[in-house]
Amino acid sequence: RQQAALTLAQACHIFGNDYTTLKPRVIKTLCEAMGPDKPLTTQYGGIVGITLFGPKAVDAFILPLATLYWQKWESKLQDLQHEHDQEQQLQLQQCKHALLVRI
């Protein structure tokens, strides 16, 4: 997911001047990937991707959701500790780590 996000950001940097709607369309797609109905791995990719577009993108698209998502992920982590679902726990921890490191 990190490599895919980096590739998207590089494509926007290289081709953004020739295709003026490229960057906004990519950011819109990344925002949709962060939707609460999306899998955790997709949300992670959306977070990582948006952060590569800089601090203004983070301020506009990630920060407004950060607290809500953090609380939701914490609650899920608490529930999963009793179920021993290590895969989902790892996905949740990766999403939380992406928020901490990227913003």
Image: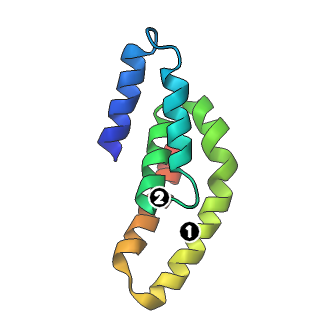
For disc 1, the marked residue is 73
Q: Is residue 71 left or right of residue 14?
A: right
Q: Is residue 41 above or below residue 79?
A: above
Q: Is residue 80 left or right of residue 87?
A: right
The CA span between labels 1 and 2 is 8 Å
Give 56 or 61, whichever is nearer the viewer.
61
**Residue at the top extreme, as displayed:** 18
Say whether marks 1 and 2 touch (CB < 8 Å).
yes
The 10 Å Cα crowd at callout 1, few under 14, some 14 to 19, many 20 or more, is some
Which quadrant is the C terminus positioned in? Answer: top right
Badge 1 marks a residue whose secondary structure is helix
* Kind of residue sitting beneath label 2: Cys
Assign a secondary structure to mark 2: helix
Q: Residues within 10 Å of mark 2 (few under 14, many from 20)?
A: many
User: In the image, what residue type sits under mark 1?
Assistant: Trp
Q: Which residue is mark 2?
A: 95
**Residue in view at x 42 percent, y 73 percent:** 89
